[in-house]
Image: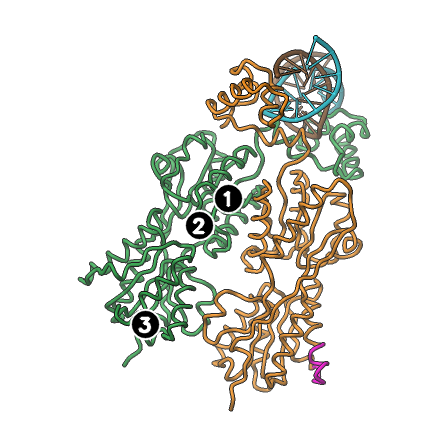
Chain colours: A orange, B green, C brown, D cyan
Amino acid sequence: MNQINISMVAQKAQVSNSTVSRVLNNSPLVRPETASKVRAVIAELGYQPSEIARGLRMNETKTIGVIVSNVLNHFFTGMVRGIEDIANKSAYNIVLCNTDEQPEKEQQYLKTLLSKRVDGLIIASTGPQNDYSTLIGNLPVVFVDRRPGGRSAEMFDTILVDNKGGSFQAVEHLIQNGYRRIGIITGSNVGTTGSERLQGYKDALAAYDLPIDEKLIKIGDFLGHTAYQHARELLEPKMKCDAIFVANNIILLSTMKALRDCNRKCPRDIGLVAFDDMDWMEYCTPRFTAVAQPTYQMGTLAMEMLLERLSAKETFAPKTIVLPVKLEVRDSSIRRKD
Amino acid sequence: MNQINISMVAQKAQVSNSTVSRVLNNSPLVRPETASKVRAVIAELGYQPSEIARGLRMNETKTIGVIVSNVLNHFFTGMVRGIEDIANKSAYNIVLCNTDEQPEKEQQYLKTLLSKRVDGLIIASTGPQNDYSTLIGNLPVVFVDRRPGGRSAEMFDTILVDNKGGSFQAVEHLIQNGYRRIGIITGSNVGTTGSERLQGYKDALAAYDLPIDEKLIKIGDFLGHTAYQHARELLEPKMKCDAIFVANNIILLSTMKALRDCNRKCPRDIGLVAFDDMDWMEYCTPRFTAVAQPTYQMGTLAMEMLLERLSAKETFAPKTIVLPVKLEVRDSSIRRKD
DNA sequence: TTGAAAGCGCTAACAC
DNA sequence: GTGTTAGCGCTTTCAA
């Protein structure tokens, strides 16, 4: 244990605690000789000032809480890395929390992080039904990926991606490549992510005067529990489904598994576009067409917005930023010429 | 800001701070009526005790530091998630740090985490040249993935995987499938990961009386900066390389890119086995043969060992655990019959 | 330029 | 059962 404290340093350097404190904080009000004497003792003792005591006194912890669904989802991994990079650059640390989309877990994390007096929060909300305003008070918060519900929507900074536009592009691309009976496998549309991606799908069909067939719309969860079964259903011959739009990378994997199990080849038998671009999609066979989200950038941006609030003297109006997505056209969505 | 403190609660409930504290800590030394009165006030005020003040007083933060190379590497993502799950179950939080294999970044994180008085540390060391013993004192630490160097090796708990065995199996499998000129693309062998995986490769060749050709051994880094060039070199016709063993998932991607750019098909033109199993490998074409590491389990185990130390009254001898890996045989390593 | 002292919010020994 | 008090390690007036 690092049991050396400021008093021991002070004593050994024959100065007062205040002077040591001033040296630690590079105060100019210390005679250079005194300062170097103190610094020598600090080095000799290997003294590490307690950020915990400092935090209590200063009311800041240089720590921010990051609440995501699951860091194993590559979307969040990228975001977390982006957040951490900016945080680190500004001498902040991040506490990582995984909710698995459970509001109760989120609530628990929130309480703990608040108790630990984090300086700010970045949250991918588990649902629009949650009320954050009462619990959070005026702690700086940036919501990412999903718009929080109720009053929270107007109270906090939010960074989103253009889910609807991305879905629209993806489905439009399939239509333009000759696919007509396009299915969608998506997650819960309680959250904004799900509902917007579904809307983009519907809008694209409507824009091209294609009928919306509810049987081709499979709504489950984004965690992959339901996707395999949904894919199997869409792949049944009677569905005559000729392309599938999957609403995230986890659902894609289940769908790939279903394709394999049904011995259906993509794009020969069926077209496929996914939301979420992954590094391997460029190199596998077929190369997968996907909607690329700026995950890393979402993280850096979120942290930068948080830093802005943290350093701001006055409060200012919350902002909402919607980042563009990009359709990476590859092979899985290109109908082979017959 | 959550400016409500214990005194405000005490005042409003007409009791002393101690009584409130006792209620918070579920002490039996409080009359039930008093307790419920206090609890009512706590709820009314939305009081959240400051873990920072508590931490200062109790000398514990219920936080542990996790230092990995890069959470974007799926190997570490899995580990981090494993750590977090166990930590959460035991009311701990984790602070996530990415070193990018830079000892200076690691050193910086270490100092910060120590200052923040984390209760323990889980570290994937950036190199065996680092000395942890002096800086860390007797804080509980578990090293993961790489054995720390010098005296640290004997001083701390360590969780490793059977790198040498995994490589051996992978290369042996290639040999048994008829490949003879097997190249390896690996990362720095300064760390134990690199050197052990290289050794496994050499051992397998030796075991089957195959010559070790230094030209087929490409040592770069595990971050993927050098792998593409190395793959291109191995793929030159004059190398007559008929299979490649790549030492992690990032190197694999670069190699896949090189294969594509050289228009070489796997396994038709060349066999491939990777260290690190990824979820998509089961469903792409060809399905990739890979050495699966128990990443999640490494995380849970590391955190469990840490908890054991944290709750132990006495110090006990450090343990080293080497976890087995499993070769997942798929298509990329099966020589097609000519 | 330096030191003495108060206090951040909590817990625990000790008194009653 | 409950309150008083000291103190965890730091910063910051205020005084000198």
Q: Nearer the viewer, mark 3 or mark 1?
A: 3
* Residue B100 forms part of the magenta stretch: no
Q: Alpha-carbon neighbours of circle 2 within 10 Å: few (<14), some, or many (≥20)?
A: many
Amino acid type, callout 2: Met
Residue A14 versus residue B191 in the image, above or below? above
Q: Quadrant of residue B35?
A: top right
Residue indicated by mark 3: B270
Q: Amino acid at mark 3?
A: Ile
**Residue A185 position in % (x across, y down):** 62, 73
Sequence-wise, the earlier of marks 2 and 1 is: 1
SS class, disc 3: loop
Q: Chain of mark 3?
A: B
* Marker count (numbered): 3
- Callout 1: helix, strand or loop? strand
Mark 2 touching mark 1, by CB under 8 A?
no
The residues tagged by marks 2 and 1 sit, at their Cα atoms, a distance apart of: 13 Å
Quick check: do tags 2 and 1 share a chain? yes
Labels 2 and 3 within one chain: yes
In the rendered image, residue A210, in percent from the top left (x then y), is placed at 70, 85
Q: Chain of mark 2?
A: B
For disc 1, the marked residue is B66
Magenta-highlighted residues? A203-212
Distance from Cα at disc 2 to Cα at disc 3:
32 Å
Residue B298: numbered disc = 2
